């Protein structure tokens, strides 16, 4: 199964207009532990090179036992996520011929992503920006959103094409964050 996983605001922005996370960014041990349950079922994480560069080195520091400069402490759920991420195959979408940190997919991504279903033990987690996702929605099976109770009104919106979804589950945390799972209706 191919599962899009993204952090969003209530108005489905994936970042501020400046490309950073919004404030307040309410994410703690409970939320991370819940997402870890989803990542345990995955064997591959397919992502854009922008997300790879922003996410993977940070979690590699955590896996190495280091506390990144922008946080006070690392919790047990964070350590578990770092271990899960370290054990996953990562595949990156990029046109940069110099990118060497992970296997690369280029060109028509949808059929290549669909083929990953057959070479992955477990789910394929997909994380990318709106422009990339617009072409990939036809091969996506589920959407897993961590929706933060913040409206920023500017910045890239996750959904840029029409998409019909069927609600599967919602988990609400004391922080106000909701993790919502949808199936893509066919």
Image: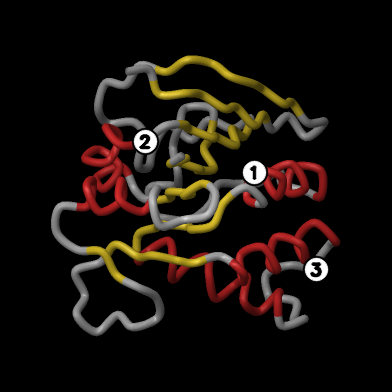
Image location of residue 128, percent across then percent down: 37, 50
Mark 2 vs 1, N-terminal side: 1
Residue occupied by mark 1 = 38
Disc 2 to disc 1: CB gap under 8 Å: no
Q: Can you say whether 25 is above or below 102 in the image?
A: above
Marks 2 and 1 sit apart, C-alpha to C-alpha, by 16 Å
**Location of residue 164 (image quadrant):** top left
Total residue callouts = 3
Q: What element carries label 1?
A: helix
Q: Which residue lies furthest to the left in this view?
A: 107
How packed mark 1 is, by other alpha carbons closer than 10 Å (few <14, some 14-19, many 20 or more), is some
Image location of residue 87, percent across then percent down: 61, 69
Q: In this view, does 172 lie to the left or right of 119?
A: right
Residue appearing at x 38%, y 50% in the figure: 118
Image location of residue 98, percent across then percent down: 24, 84
Residue occupied by mark 3 = 72
Q: Can you say whether 99 is above or below 159 in the image?
A: below
Q: What element carries label 3?
A: loop
Mark 3 vs 1, N-terminal side: 1
């Amino acid at each position: 199964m191919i599962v899009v996983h993204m952090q969003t605001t209530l108005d489905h922005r994936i970042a501020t207009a400046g490309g950073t996370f919004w404030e307040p960014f309410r994410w703690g041990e409970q939320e991370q532990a819940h997402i870890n349950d989803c990542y345990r079922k995955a064997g591959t994480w397919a992502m854009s090179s922008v997300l790879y560069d922003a996410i993977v080195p940070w979690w590699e520091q955590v896996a190495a036992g280091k506390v990144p400069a922008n946080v006070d402490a690392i919790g047990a759920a964070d350590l578990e996520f770092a271990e899960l991420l370290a054990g996953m195959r990562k595949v990156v979408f990029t046109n940069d011929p110099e990118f060497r940190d992970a296997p690369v997919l280029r060109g028509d991504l949808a059929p290549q992503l669909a083929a990953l279903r057959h070479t992955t033990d477990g789910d394929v987690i997909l994380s990318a920006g709106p422009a990339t996702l617009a072409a990939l929605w036809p091969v996506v099976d589920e959407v897993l959103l961590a929706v933060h109770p913040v409206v920023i009104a500017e910045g890239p919106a996750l959904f840029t094409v029409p998409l019909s979804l069927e609600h599967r589950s919602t988990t609400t945390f004391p922080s106000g964050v909701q993790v919502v799972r949808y199936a893509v209706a066919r």
